[in-house]
Amino acid sequence: MMKYVYALILLAGLSVSAQAQVQPGDWATPFTLTDINGNEQRLYDFLSEGKPVIMVMSAAWCLPCWNLHNSGVLEEIYATYGPDGTDEIMVLFIEADPNTSFEQLTGMEGPSQGNWVSGTPYPIIDVQDFGLPAAYGLQAYPTVAMICPDMRIKIPQMWSGLSNWTVENVLNEAFSCNNEPLPNDAAIHEFSSRPTLCGTADVAAKLYNSGASVVNSAEVSLLREGQVLATTTWAGELPTGAEAPIVFEGVPLAPGFNAFRLELSGMDDDPGNNSVNLGIYNAPNTTLTLNFYAQGDEDAAEDQTRWLIINELQDTVASGLIGLDYQETSISLPAEGCYEFVVADDGENGLSGGGFILATDLNGNPIMDASDNFASERRQRFFASTVVNTQHYARSNAELELFPNPASHEVQLRFGLPSEGAARLSLFNANGQEVFSRTYTKLPSGTQQLSAPCGALPNGWYTARLQTTAGTLHGRFIKQ
């Protein structure tokens, strides 16, 4: 049930932005996805062949989706006008909640309305993230989009209930599609997964021809924070619906998050698809020795909650199990290089019952924080080096510095106040219980330093919260 609630919360966030952004006539974002039978489904192949595409975005647990699925409307249309019929229309079913499993799709586990696979003739695609649903303005489950051969979204949402969901109504919209793309419409796109990489990255996207005229050349610029880093020229022959890769190799990454933008130069009939934003994180530098602290929840042993570190060759260089008892250990890495810290849980609910998993370097800089429901796994890349910065771990929240971290007897809190006023300091354990509090009737403006005793607290992971008249500050530390 946790997955179901999470999907509803995230869907609420998607629907607000999607309704404001996706309109009739908007460009149809290209995609190539593999269905559950291993067959590749490429949207622009269907559109360039003159076929309207009916795309259903559904969720295995959704009752209105199940009603649509069992109406027989799409089965009848697909049988008559699909690949085994007149081959005039394509239907794609998207399981659009990444948090559902294949077992839910087949009705083998819940929450699920039943077996969505049995008897379904059209392709079923089980997406792994919200990239496609967001691009097509997922408003609610189900969302049914009509996409036309002009490479445009004719109707972002066809579904309004069973009363209007008829073969006749759907066919009327499909056969009244505009089949002519814009005369000149080159586009650039890529779904951004915001990966974490070490030091350099190949920044890549695809050049598409969404227009009627052949694209023979295109100039693409790579920007970061408005500054042009590089420009490349593509030359070739790109007919309607075709694509070509655009790659900027070995781009040095700035510290932290890198916001890249790829732009097509010049103007065409739709400038709105002439750029794409891509994000890449530069993996943090760490010491070669790491500190590891963990305490699992009650089902950690049963779920085989564990951690491992893998190198660039995908070899495991360190690993261990996480149990109910508190543990701390020192991990020595064999050499400088790019590594990935992985925590995994066979129960697919992380530490939903409490506990924490934290790895830092010798300077307290965080590498892995998995003190929540991280589902089946969480991954974080880092670059182990003999030369690293010396910032405190709590500097990840620049407004509240906690030290020493880890702390044994007392933790210090340093922060700045814009004006004098009252304050309340609280400490919370990993289960969210308040274990310490202190009220200050008046603190002066400027840099302040307070202390909180922690010697009597059990070893583990704690959150410090400081409520002031200027706002609330948070920081986290380990008691050892």
Image (cartoon, rainbow, N blue to C red):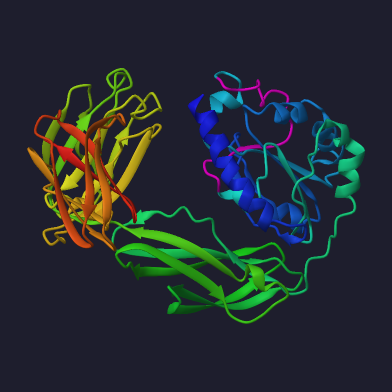
Compared to residue 460, the image places residue 135 above or below, namely below
Does residue 12 belong to the magenta stretch?
Answer: no
Q: Is residue 416 above or below residue 452?
A: below
- What is the x, y in percent for residue 375? 40, 32
Query: In the image as oriented, which residue stretches furthest toward the bottom?
Result: 266
Residue 421 visible at all:
yes
Relative to the observer, which residue lies in front, 101 or 356?
356
Q: Residue furthest front?
A: 441
Q: Position of residue 358 (x, y in %)?
A: 23, 39
- Relative to 336, is 163 on the left or the right? right
Magenta-drawn stretch contains 127 = yes
Residue 357 in picture, x, y percent from top left: 25, 35
Residue extent of the magenta highlight:
110-130
The residue lying at 58 percent from left, 80 percent from top is 265
- Note whether 113 is above or below 329 in the view shown: above
Q: How many marks?
A: 0
Q: Nearer the viewer, residue 136 or 457?
A: 457
Secondary structure, magenta segment, majority class = loop
The quarter of the image holding the C terminus is top left
Q: Position of residue 464 (x, y in %)?
A: 24, 42
Q: Quadrant of residue 45?
A: bottom right
Q: Residue at x 67, y 40 (%)?
A: 140
The reply to whether residue 332 is visible in this rendering is no
Viewer-side residue, 366 vs 51: 366
Q: Look at 77% across and 25% down and name the residue there.
A: 70
Q: Residue at image x 60%, y 50%?
A: 134
